[in-house]
Each structure stands twice: as C-alpha cells, then as structure tokens.
Image: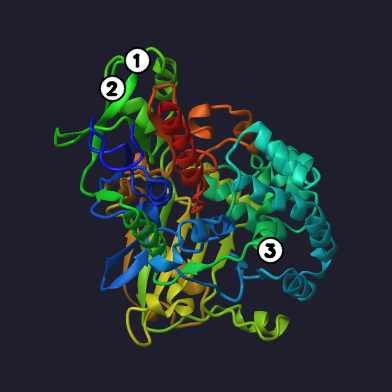
Amino acid sequence: MTTSGVTATGDAQVLVVGGGHNGMVAAAYLARSGVDVLVVEARSEVGGCASTVDDLGARFNVCHCTHSLIRALPLEEELDLAAHGLSYVSADADAVFAFHDDRDPWVLFHDVERTLDGLAATHPGSLDGYHRYLDEALPAARLLLDVLRTPPTARRLAATAARRRMVGLGRLLRWSRQSAADVLGRFFDDWRLAMPATSIGPTVWGVPPDTPGTGLAALAYAIRHLVRSGRPVGGSGALVAALRGSFEAAGGRVRCDARVAALVVDGDRVDGVRLVDGSRLRAPVVLAACDPTVVLAEWLAGEPPAGIAPLVADHRARPRPEGYESKVDALLDGVPVPRSADALRAALPGFDPIGQLSVVSPDPDDLAEAHHRRAEGRVADRPTLLVDVPSHVDPAMAPGPGRHVLSLEVLFTPYAHPGGWENSTEPERWLDMWAERMEPGARSLVSDWRVMTPDRYRDEFLLDRGHSPAWAGTPLDAFLGRSPETTRYRTPLDGLFLTGAGTFPGAGIVGASGRNAARAVMAGLGAAR
C-alpha cells in the first residue's frame, strides 16, 4: 500500500464518508500526511451542521455559530487554516445569562476579573461561591483541555496528568460521574448562577441536570475563562471552507451529492461503499464521519462478518433518539435592544449588551416541566433560548447596510410534535417571545424569517429522526477504551473507522474526534504497510 497517489486497487486509499467539520478535519490531516483521500458527501456542499447557508437573500448559520473548544486545539496552526481564509472575531462578552422572568441577568466574560466585578454588582451573594468554583474548576478545566488535545489512551492520560502533577485529575474523574446539579449546587445557592451551565450543557445534550454523568457541564464557565470564544468571520461555514482548502491543497478530493447506502465488505474487511444510485467506490479504508448507529445498524446489510456481528446487533437493538432542537433565522431592519440593557450598563460600566449572545434559561421548575412536555411531544411554555445577532459582531454576516440577521435557537422542540411541524404555530410564538424580551418595536424589525425544525434537519441534513448524535461517555470511559468503536475510532471490521459527534469527544464544534481519528487511521495504514 502506498502513501500517495490513487491506489491500484480502488478509488482512494481512504474514503471519508461525511463532510461535516470532523470529517473534514480528519481528511485534511490524512491528506497532509500524504494519504490519498476522497471525501464523500451526501449534500451539495460540505459542512453539515457547521455550515452557513444562503436563504432569504442572507447568510445564516445552520446551528449556533460561537466556537469555543475547537479553539483550544492546534488545528489552525497544524492545518494552516488562516492561509485558507479562516479568521475569528469575538464579542465583548462570552454570554449574557438572562431568565424568562427578566430579573437579575449576569454576564460571563473571558476575563475572570471582569466577571467577578460584574457579579459583585449583580449577584453579590454569589461572589464567594464563584471564587470557590474557580479554585476547584480551573485546574480540572485545564486538564480537560489537555485531554482534548491528546488521543485517548490510559497511558496518555497518565502522562498528561503527570505533566500537571496530577492537579485536577481526581476532580475531573469524580465530577464526570456526578450530576451537573450536584456539582453546581456545591457552589451556588442561587439557581440563576447554576442554570446557565445547565442550559449550555445538559439541556443541549437533551438530559435533565440531575442525570449522573453530566457533572463536567459545571466546567462550562471555567473553560470559557481559559479559551476565548469566537465566531469565524463570514459565518461558521468559514471554518469548513478553510478545512476544505487545506485538504484540497494537499491533494484531497471531494465528491458531493453522493449519498452512501451501504458498506461493501470483502470477506472480513471493508472494501468501500455503495451509493444510493447503485454505483460503488472502492477503498481499503472507510472513515465514517456520521452517526455511528446508522453506520453499524443500517450500512451492513444482511449477515455481518462474525467479528463485527455482536457490535452490529448491539447498535440495532438500541433505541433511536429523536431530535429536539429548532432554530429561527430572521432578517432584521435594525438592531434590537434588550429590555435589560440599561440595568446591565449601570452594573457594568463600559459594557454594551446590544448584540451580545444571550442564553435565556427557565427556572428549575420550568425546566423539569419542559422535560415532561418533551416526552409528550410538546414544546415548553418557557423553553431554553440561545439568542444572537451574529451580524452585529461580524459585519460580514450583514445582509445589507443597516440590516442584520437574528439567530434564535430553541430547546426543547420535539421531533414527534403533535400534528407535525409544517403547520405548527410554535415558531411564530418563539419570535413573539423573543420580541417581548426586547424594547418595544422589535417584532416590527423582522422583515422575513425561516425556521429549522427537527424534520428539516432530518430531510436537509440527513440526521436520523432529526437528532444530532453526541457521545455520551465520560473521560474515564474514553481513556479505558470502553466502547472502543467510539473511543478508539476503530471497529472490529478491518478497515472501518468512525469519527464525528457520536464519538469521543462529541457534541458541538470541537474537532478533536476528527483529529484523533486521523491518527488512528494513520496507525492502521502504518500497520498495513
């Protein structure tokens, strides 16, 4: 087997199936290492849910556009992404944390001291708790960021922890087994300090905050103090465009509008894929950058090879989760002003709350009711909202002079919504709910809008039941190699590897899974040579 050029036995050395950001990260690393790689993407363009799309005469991010954890990785340097057009811009604040009752918002800044100064003005009773939180969370968060940069093995975990003299290791492992509610409750008596971490953690993951194994959500604030969040100039899709540029500059190839129907198996190893049009692509290695359960439960038709049969049976028996996120994108003839703007300006001199990302959390009782209603397919009366005006921070996103785009993400909005989403009045209610949080006249700024509901994520982004997969394990699971197909990226079927949000460390724009999977594939190619 060679390490460059098209192999004599197929269309590429490695087929990467799925051009989302993890697939493109893995493909770029492989191509830049001299491997011949073909990315096969079902849609007309790469990017997946990290895309920025054209609609209504504007550019909209498919999902939320703020990048945090991915900026902790050395992707920009290792893949030379700046040379391919990637640059970031940051808002003044990481987030404004607000609540449905419109009382007592607070602001999280990348700078610790600014955050503490703000809490002294808005929540003085929680200041001591936040100091204690920082003392315990920052060492664990530093270690977690090192872990994200390290391919997961027990030996590497030990080496990473040793470099930090084991500081934070016990806490990281202990919190990973606890619930977010238990961990946060140790520091904060006021639910307004704990609930935002729940909103951007367990709520986004689709589980209640008292679920064991969600405790690392408590690191949300600490991580944002260590890693400055940013937005790719021109939209989230600029990240994927830069990844594609890096990949193609190294000789990689992309084939879009090519949906995979099945894996092709020759004996006890993979031999490529078959597309829905019946054509076949051959390669000795397939890296599937999509939902692992779909790959293992559906792409191996008939009787799978003996070595992988137990894993296939396990994934076929698993319940298939349903999507629960929706997003409204709107065109605005101006910038809306939050009702809380004056109070925040008074508490935080020099801070302008207009155009900042706002996370609107329900109170604990409303969140419990939201989970109950979700089980019945109904939307919460007071759902969790992520509100942003991306064009205020990044003028490249503006659709024209004086005009802006609104991003309104809503949780929970069940896939199995009674009566279906096509004729639902819920999306307009969310817009009205947003407008009520603004100064009068905000609703009249909306000149046009569209909505992405779980059924559209299913149809347009091929997410099974509209659900975006996420890896559900703990760091200890990853480093002990439990569920090795998702923590070591290699399956029992020779030549079949997995990456994407359903593998460690999945969910959100991270990219570590793609980087780790590329290393696993390279190791496999080295063994084959």
Label 1 or label 3, whichever comes before in sequence order: 3
CA gap between label 1 and label 3 equals: 48 Å
CA gap between label 3 and label 2 equals: 48 Å
Residue 362 sits above or below residue 179 on the image: below
CA gap between label 2 and label 1 equals: 8 Å
- Do we see residue 212 in this rendering? no
Which residue is at a point 60% across and 68% down the rendered structure image? 95
Classed neighbour count for the residue bearing mark 3: other residues with Cα under 10 Å, few (<14), some (14–19), many (≥20):
many
Residue 440 sits above or below residue 19 on the image: below
Residue bearing the label numbered 1: 305
Q: Residue furthest top?
A: 306
Expressed as whole percent of the image width and height from the top left, the position of residue 73 reads: 56, 55
Please, what is the three-letter code of the amino acid marked with disc 2? Answer: Val
Expressed as whole percent of the image width and height from the top left, the position of residue 233 reads: 43, 72
Which residue is at a point 40% across and 37% down the rendered structure image? 291
Q: In which quarter of the image is the C terminus?
A: top left
CB under 8 Å between discs 1 and 3? no
Local SS, label 1 = loop
Residue bearing the label numbered 2: 265
Please, what is the three-letter code of the amino acid marked with disc 1? Answer: Pro
Residue bearing the label numbered 3: 225
CB under 8 Å between discs 2 and 1? yes
* Displayed quadrant of residue 199: bottom right
